[in-house]
Amino acid sequence: MIPPIKELRAICQEPVRQAEQGVFTNALYRGASIYVTKLFLQINITANQCTLLFTLLGVVGGVTLAIGTYWTNVIAALLFQISYLLDFVDGEIARYRRTSSRKGLFLDLIGHHFIDGALFAGLSFSAYASTHQSYMFALAFTAFVGIMSLYDLPLIRAYIAKRSGGTLDPMQPSSEHAAAQGLPLAANRPERRARRVMSVISRLLWLWSSPGIFGFTLIGALLNRLDLVVCFLGISSPIVFIRQAYYEARALEAKG
């Protein structure tokens, strides 16, 4: 017997995990995902099957996006939203059934790479279809490289943590605050002002994660301006990555 939603939420959605993901994802995705989780538990869908399903939906979304018409863009953007929602559901199923495994984590990470590749490939063709400007392909490529490099920073940090004997915390948010990175405290007003600016920017980093990118895609599709989404991500993503990489290097240097 599957427990009621309130009890199921307590079992499947860990408080620490919620704190890491913040208010945005909790309100929009965690709030809805638990209902899908209950349905999938009732019809005996496993966590790995759910992972494969959200991967398939993301890839289909990318192919649909590449067609480049208004309604295929909107349908594709909705498919990406459903895909991301199911990304929460597979973890909740695994926690309820206690079937979390390395295989499941591997499938999840590989699925994200397939989805991101399909998304940016689809965005490039859709933006080209509306503008007939070949530089859209270049901007989509730089966006893809920047976003994937951002995703890889925690993996690089975890690798360094392992190689250094576990003296670094691979789960510590990078460049959230300079003090948390072991950087020297600001001694004067310009440095404190720069610190505050960096703190604000850090709180906006979700814009370059899955909920932000899929949100941009949905808005761009509804407004029929996916070309602007490609331009924004193509220009901003490499800049954000360089900033993050710089602060990661500073943090590692400070920690010795």
Image (cartoon, rainbow, N blue to C red):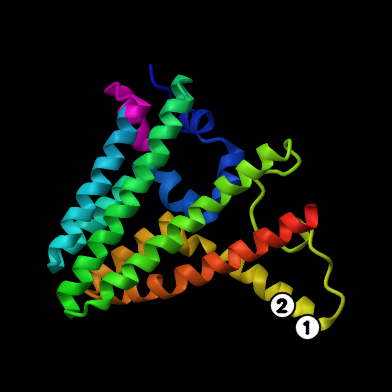
What is the C-alpha distance between the residues marked 1 and 2? Answer: 6 Å
Residue 72, percent across and down? 14, 61
Res. 110 image quadrant? top left
Residue 175 visible somewhere in the drawing: no
In this view, 13 is above or below 32: above
Q: Residue furthest right?
A: 187
Q: Residue furthest front?
A: 163
- Queried whether the magenta region covers residue 43, the answer comes back as yes
Of residues 209 and 45, the one drawn nearer to the viewer in this rendering = 209
Residue 82, percent across and down? 29, 47
Q: In percent of the image, x 45 and y 21: which residue is there? A: 99
Residue 15, percent across and down? 60, 39
Query: Which quarter of the figure is the N terminus placed in?
Result: top left
Q: In percent of the image, x 34 and y 35: which residue is there? A: 51
In this view, 19 is above or below 251: above
Circles 1 and 2 in contact, beta carbons < 8 Å? yes
Label 1 Cα crowd, 10 Å radius (few <14 / some 14-19 / many 20+) = few
Res. 183 image quadrant? bottom right
Instruction: Residue under label 2, please give it.
Output: 194
Q: Secondary structure at mark 1?
A: helix
In-image side of 112 versus 52 (left or right)? right
Of residues 165 and 175, the one drawn nearer to the viewer in this rendering = 165
Q: Amino acid at mark 1?
A: Pro
Residue 13, percent across and down? 51, 35
Q: In percent of the image, x 64 and y 52: which residue is there? A: 173
Instruction: Residue under label 1, please give it.
Output: 190
